[in-house]
Image (tube, rainbow, N blue to C red):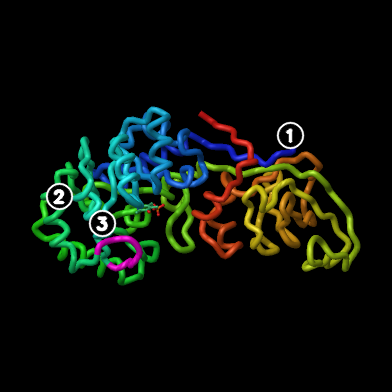
């Protein structure tokens, strides 16, 4: 035992969750989304496991992520979701056979100007209502024409992204699906629409290729959802150790700002994990942690290297005991709710100093 915060990465759970993607969207091909260091799980590690498990393709956000995958010997199709900034980036992407998302008229102009020795595969992204990245519906016909005529383009496919698929009651998803279908009518091309919430909640969005991110890592993409309810298993378990057990009097304040005071004489535990490890500073008092399998509440403010917990009612707790911050036995979704955020942010934010243990 060492006093470092650790993430355990469970490769079995990752493979299980990929199988859940296949069950949920039968007949589609899978683009595993592994941007942002595979949501904190390790870009190359996750790519290798999913490559072996038969993921059809990978998606990353940026050029440098795509190049890291190629350097590590990943040979599957890779899609760069943010496209390219200029002709230099386009050239690099093409040279490494990375597929590009064309989400702006500017991209079409660069493709037309650039004489690529190797043409690129293009995902033409339509803004069906999210209003983030994508070409507006009224420009689609003209830009599609130009892309089909462009020598720098080989395969041409269609995509869009859903803004509210995490909310089963939202009408926006139906509106987006309809606008996308209307806009692309008569265009003979494969289609990709669904992220995790599309895969699990909107069968109409499955198309030819699905783009799961969060569900691969075992968390639910739905508001107030739990991965377990979707048959998913957590891949990451974030843990550390109890490094002190202290006894205080009623009224004694705990931690920075003295924002929390002991309501009675009591024991307080100190855990070697803080926002410097990626634990959210905004987690409120009462946020659960697990010590030897017992749920105990956080107290006071989270600091850089430590957080404090209420040991009232805890049986047989000692310095050195394992503390689970999220993962097996404690859903990351629940911790995210206590910190007014989403599981995506917590998983991505695990810091570089955190040790990694891989369970094969
Ligand atoms: C990140 C991302 C995804 C994956 O989304 P999840 O909600 O994590 O499944 C899919 N498509 C695009 C365009 C993305 O940016």
Residue where numbered disc 3 is placed: 125
Residue where numbered disc 1 is placed: 2
User: How far apart, in angstroms, are the residues tagged by discs 1 and 2?
Assistant: 54 Å
- Label 1 element class: loop
In front of the other: 64 or 309: 64
Q: Which mark is residue 189?
A: 2
- Label 3 element class: strand
**Is tag 1's residue or tag 2's residue first in the polypeptide sequence?**
1
User: How far apart, in angstroms, are the residues tagged by discs 2 and 3?
Assistant: 12 Å
Mark 3 CB lies closer than 8 A to ligand 1:
yes
Q: Residue at x 38, y 27 (%)?
A: 73
- Label 2 element class: loop
Residue 135 in percent (x, y) is at: 25, 62
Mark 1 CB lies closer than 8 A to ligand 1:
no
Q: Report the predominant secondary structure element of the magenta stretch.
A: loop
**Is tag 2's residue or tag 3's residue first in the polypeptide sequence?**
3
Magenta residue span: 129-135
**Is tag 3's residue or tag 1's residue first in the polypeptide sequence?**
1
- Relative to residue 202, is residue 257 drawn left or right? right
């Amino acid at each position: 035992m060492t006093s470092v915060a650790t993430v355990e990465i469970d490769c079995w759970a990752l493979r299980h969750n990929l199988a859940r993607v296949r069950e949920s969207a039968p007949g589609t091909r899978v683009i595993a989304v592994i941007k942002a260091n595979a949501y904190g799980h390790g870009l190359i590690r996750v790519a290798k496991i999913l490559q072996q498990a038969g993921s059809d393709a990978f998606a990353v956000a940026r050029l440098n992520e795509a190049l890291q995958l190629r350097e590590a010997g990943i040979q599957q199709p890779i899609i760069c979701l943010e496209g390219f900034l200029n002709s230099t980036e386009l050239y690099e992407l093409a040279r490494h056979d990375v597929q590009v998302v064309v989400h702006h008229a500017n991209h079409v102009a660069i493709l037309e100007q650039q004489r690529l020795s190797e043409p690129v595969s293009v995902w033409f992204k339509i803004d069906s209502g999210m209003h983030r990245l994508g070409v507006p519906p009224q420009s689609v016909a003209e830009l599609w024409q130009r892309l089909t005529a462009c020598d720098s383009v080989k395969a041409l496919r269609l995509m869009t992204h859903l803004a509210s698929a995490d909310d089963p009651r939202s009408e926006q998803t139906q509106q987006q699906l309809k606008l996308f279908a209307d806009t692309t009518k008569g265009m003979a091309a494969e289609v990709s629409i669904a992220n995790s919430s599309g895969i699990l909640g909107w069968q109409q969005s499955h198309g030819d290729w699905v783009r799961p991110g969060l569900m691969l890592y075992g968390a639910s993409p739905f508001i107030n959802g739990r991965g377990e309810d979707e048959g998913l298993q957590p891949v990451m378990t974030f843990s550390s150790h109890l490094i002190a057990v202290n006894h205080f009097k009623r009224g004694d304040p705990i931690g920075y700002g003295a924002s929390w005071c002991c309501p009675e004489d009591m024991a307080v535990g100190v855990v070697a994990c803080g926002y410097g490890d990626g634990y959210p500073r905004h987690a409120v008092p009462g946020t659960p942690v697990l010590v030897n399998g017992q749920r105990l509440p956080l107290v006071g403010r989270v600091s850089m290297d430590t957080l404090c917990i209420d040991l009232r009612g805890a049986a047989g707790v000692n310095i050195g005991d394992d503390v689970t911050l999220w993962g097996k036995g404690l859903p990351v979704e629940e911790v995210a709710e206590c910190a007014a955020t989403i599981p995506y942010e917590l998983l991505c934010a695990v810091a570089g100093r955190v040790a990694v243990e891989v369970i094969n």
